[in-house]
Image (cartoon, rainbow, N blue to C red):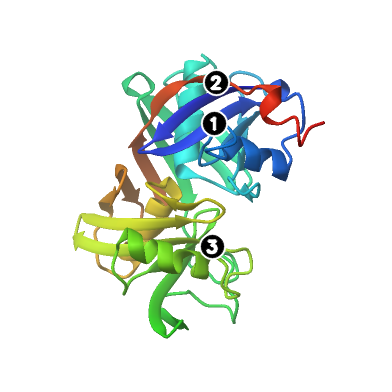
Amino acid sequence: MKFHRYHALGNDYLVVRASDCEVPLTTVLSQRICHRNFGIGSDGILVHEDGEAGATFRLRIINPDGSEAEKSGNGLRIFARYLWDSKLVTDAPFHVDTAGGRVTCVISQHGRLVTVDMGRVSFDSTVIPVQGGPREVLSEELTINGTKITFCAATVGNPHCVVTNLPSTEETARAFGPLLETNPLFPNRTNVQFLKVVDRATISIEIWERGAGYTLASGSSSSAAAAVAHRLGLVDNDITVRMPGGTIRIEIAPDFSIRMEGPVTRVGTLELDHEAIEDICA
């Protein structure tokens, strides 16, 4: 299988065309490919489902643990850059369908900057989903290992838990991220962000990504965290999101539709040898 590697602020993905997969991308095979010691290594796999140039493209997103994500902001930017490099799109707007909904992408700076209309953020517990009665999940509390956590929940096509009262550090993300990701409050598991408001136009976040773990950057996490900060009245509607891997710009419309803008870097092309997977694809 031939893979194209890109990263978006250090969040790296492998892109493969579905028709180039000689064997199905099962959970076990995806785990092996994403493993950084026994496979190629990545934060996930982006599968280009076959379609005609100029049509709406279909993207399947696989996490390193083999589960599938509904939507990924960085993944979408990378997929858009891959389509540009493959000469399947121009700098005109085009659509990509994901399990989390359809988005519109625009390429600029010769592929190095991508803008994605991510869709509308919802804080509705029945949509995210979050256990309990129907409500907007804002500034709620739960206790984990004796620590009181204040959080908001949101979805931009995939679920997010934004923590507002703990330090926005890697140590905090690694300690509490996995516990929140799998908390029974979130029946589909959840992505987790630890939010710090810098000023009215800037936030910083540390991220624990569902199915992937600690990560340097995330487009959907940036979208959700910025939307939560705006919903709480802490920031305006044009926000720079700082992450360990770099910054993303988020614009929030009055209806909480999100426009995300960020860079993509092409790394190279790799071919997976059968020897690396022969024990699981015999």
Q: Amino acid at mark 1?
A: Leu
Label 1 sits on a secondary structure element that is strand
For marks 1 and 3, the one nearer the N-term is: 1
Residue pointed to by mark 3? 190
Query: Mark 3 belongs to which amino acid?
Result: Thr
Real-space Cα separation, disc 3 to disc 2, in angstroms: 31 Å
Residue 209 percent across, percent down from the top left: 48, 54
Mark 2 and mark 1 residues within 8 Å of each other at the beta carbon: yes
**Residue 270: numbered disc:** 2
Q: Residue at x 35, y 18 (%)?
A: 110
Look at 53% across and 56% down and name the residue there: 210
Mark 2 is surrounded, within 10 Å at the Cα level, by few (under 14), some (14 to 19) or many (20 or more) other residues, namely few
Q: Is residue 86 left or right of residue 31?
A: left
The kind of secondary structure element at disc 2 is strand
Rendered image quadrant of residue 88: top right
Q: Which residue is mark 1?
A: 14
Measured from the top left, where is residue 93 in percent x and y? 46, 28
Label 2, label 1: how far apart the Cα atoms are: 9 Å
Foreground of the two, 1 or 9: 1
